[in-house]
Amino acid sequence: MLTGIGLGCISGITPGIHANTIAALMVSVYGTLLIHCGPEFVAAALIATLIAHSFLDIIPAAFIGIPDADTAYAVLPAHAMTRAGHGEEAVRISALGSLWGVIFAVPISFAGLLFLPALQPLLDYWIGIILVLIMGLIIVLSSAPFYAAMTFCGSGILGLFAFAYAPLAQGMIPGAGSVLMPLLTGLFGISVLINTGDAPIPKQKFQGIKLTNTAIIASSIPGTAAGILVGWLPGLSNATANALLLFRRSKSGYREYIVATSAANTANAVIGIAAFFAISRMRNGVMVALSALEDAIPPFSSLTLVAVMSSGGAFLLTILMARSAQVLNRIPAQAFSQIICVGMVALTYMLTDWFGLWILVLSILIGLLPGLFGVERMFCMGAISLPVILFALGF
């Protein structure tokens, strides 16, 4: 668990690196890990990485203004608070939102484990229509529906192409290559980093949390619900959950929205464990890596306990890092972003070879469209949603 928290910290605070990337790297050394550490070590480390990442990815979003796919919608509120000198408060309330997301999601996961397998066939029958309704609603209610639809369809076509030739994405590390890595890195990573500014971060002053406990809990409930919804349904992501929560932002301030999106991100991670055990569906790369353990996977209750304990450790680590985030004032954000971009290109080649680099270039170009069109980046999730919709509808 401690190893996983450490790995989740690395992926969380490093833009462009996701818990799925860490999971892919762990798959490449499965043999050594299983011999020397055992399957329980591997499983606990994977789950702890996933949970810790969902806590700590607010750090670069708030203090540097660099999001990953999960925190894209939280960047504006969190970074705005940082610009006003309240970055530590933004990180603290995000950590509280994630913690409440775990508290609410765990009992719901146990309930889902018992009752949802019987309902899953009915859900599978309607999943294509449900996804069309959700994505259609978000597109219609966006700031520019036409450009939102263009972005969704463009990324969807790229996703169809990438998945059709996914076996070509095999690099230097056997078993670690996944076409998702260059696809999502280009759409949500490098395309964002390219436009990163280099303005200095103002001096931060923490003057306490300006939200009551009641407000924090009240904001966590819809966030958890959104996270569970997109965590159980295929083809959706944390970005989709955060987009659904945008409808609350007009009624609440930045602080409540940060709490809600953080709860959604962590609840999504927790419900992914339940979906894996209940219906054998893998909602993220960590679950794919966990499935490689086959008959040696620890029971659901054990991994849920790891998730709960990891959330406690990740919460404390997030608060500690928020206190010492002043060191980021000395890091030029633009140069840091360029270093991350170079590193991600190199990692893409190592994991997915030349085909991965080609997908990366195409996904970067499509990832630049939201900025050009003035629409939300979450419509780039068409790369996942459109193939799932077409498959669910029988095409």
Image: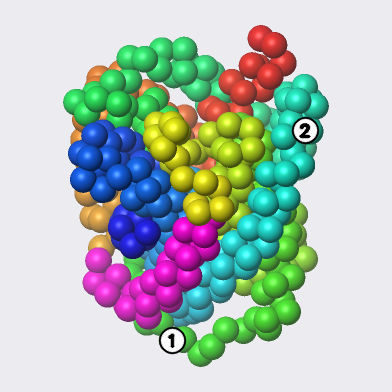
Q: Quadrant of the N terminus?
A: bottom left
Identify whether 48 is placed above or below 127: below
Q: Is 317 placed left or right of 275 in the picture?
A: left
Is residue 317 within the magenta segment? yes
**Place of residue 43 in the rendered image (x, y in percent of width and height, measured from the top left):** 40, 46
Identify whether 129 is placed above or below 117: above
- Please name whichever residue, 10 or 80, is drawn nearer the observer in this view of the structure: 10
Q: Residue at x 19, y 26 (%)?
A: 172
Secondary structure that dominates the magenta span: helix
Q: Residue at x 56, y 72 (%)?
A: 96
Residue 205, disc: 1
Instruction: Determine the image quadrant of residue 351.
Output: top left
Q: Residue at x 25, y 63 (%)?
A: 332
Name the residue that disc number 2 marks.
118
Q: Is 168 placed left or right of 139 in the picture?
A: left
**Place of residue 393 in the rendered image (x, y in percent of width and height, measured from the top left):** 72, 16
Instruction: Determine the image quadrant of residue 354.
Output: top left
**Place of residue 97 in the rendered image (x, y in percent of width and height, measured from the top left):** 59, 67
| CA–CA distance in space, label 1 to label 2 | 52 Å
Q: Amino acid at mark 1?
A: Lys
Task: Name the front one of labels 1 and 2.
Answer: 2
Instruction: Determine the image quadrant of residue 223.
Output: bottom right
Q: Amino acid at mark 2?
A: Ala
- How crowded is the residue under tag 1: few (<14 C-alpha within 10 Å), some, or many (20+)? few
Stretch of the chain drawn in magenta = 304-331
* Dot 1 or dot 2, earlier in sequence: 2
Q: Residue reaching furthest bottom?
A: 207
